[in-house]
Image: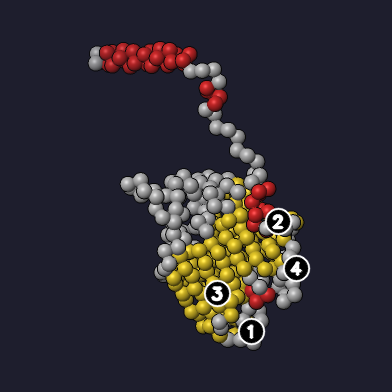
Amino acid sequence: MVARVRIPDVVRRGQPFDVRIAIQHVMETGFRFDDSGRTIARNVIHTLVARYDGVEVYRAELGSGIAANPYLQFWITAPASGVLELSWIDDAGVAGSERVPVTVRD
Amino acid sequence: MAADTPMKGRRRDVLALALAGGSGLLPLLPPGAAQAQMPTAPPPLGSGYALLVPKATQGAPVRAGRVTVDAPTLADNGHSVPVRIVVQSAMQPDDHVRSITLLSDRNPRPVIMKAWLGPRAGRAELATRVRLNGTQRILALAEMSDGTWWSGEADVVVTESACLDGS
């Protein structure tokens, strides 16, 4: 799964900064039908977790009400430089993750 | 032109037939059938939350306030509507937002998303893009670290529902 993660160029110690993530995913609702009239199985990214140096800082449970190619923005603070790891999984069991190094400035 | 005359006559005949057929059919319909086919008025905005909110909060009381839902007043397309939720909170270890839930009372699955955050978030704010099944009032719930629940809402007029193509 292709995903783009953006964080600000400058991250200050203890100051909240925003994380923006966009994942390429159909977010199939399970309410649509294919050409032969069969239901297309639901397949959405149901969980996304953000960890900073291994500590969970944000978790989101998503449903079919989230638009295709889900975009999420949230805030975290960094006490020190480290690695922000975002991981997610969809109904088909396909998981994805992104690692973003964060350099904290005073 | 001579060729026009039979054409005009034929068109009039067809119209006359259609009118006669139409007026002949109408008495067959039971009285009140025309009214029955009129679309019924939609329920008032946000009327579905009386049932949905207690389910989301597990019965905890909810107070209005501290939550701002920012969404466009008019969305041309229900497939992707930007929504921003901001909760007033100091976001300190002893006073922070524990979770934010976004609900829709007209979507087939009412819980659009639920996010868990903590004092590490620093700011109780999130943004995403949602699907909306028609004009409605969307509602956001915030659970604080002291166990209280707060809510905020926004009305969105959706011109084209996300569910028109069955999605």
Residue on which the image places disc 2: B59
Give the class, few, some or many, for how many residues have Cα within 10 Å of label 4's Cα (few <14, many ≥20): few
Disc 1 designates what residue? A79
Question: Badge 3 is on which residue?
Answer: A50
Q: Which of labels 2 and 4 is toward the front?
A: 2
Earlier in the chain: of badge 2 and badge 4, it is: 2
For the point 32% across and 46% down, the residue is A36
Protein chain holding label 3: A
Residue pointed to by mark 4: B146
Q: Are marks 1 and 3 in contact (CB under 8 Å)?
A: no
Q: Horizontal placement of B162 versus B95: left or right?
A: left
Identify the element where label 2 is drawn.
Answer: loop
Q: What amino acid type is highlighted by mark number 4?
A: Asp
For the residues bearing labels 4 and 1, Cβ distance under 8 angstroms: no
The image's mark for residue B57 is none
Q: Nearer the viewer, residue B140 or B13?
A: B140
**Alpha carbon distance from label 1 to label 3:** 15 Å
The image shows residue A104, relative to residue A38, as above or below, that is below
Q: Quadrant of the C terminus of chain A?
A: bottom right
Chain letter for mark 1, please: A
Category of crowding for the residue at label 2, using alpha-carbon neighbours closer than 10 angstroms: few (below 14), some (14–19), many (at least 20) = few
Whether marks 4 and 3 lie on the same chain: no
Q: Amino acid at mark 2?
A: Gly
Q: CA distance from mark 2 to mark 1?
A: 37 Å
Circle 3: is it few (<14), some (14-19), or many (20+) Cα within 10 Å? many
Q: Are marks 2 and 4 on the same chain?
A: yes
Subunit bearing disc 4: B
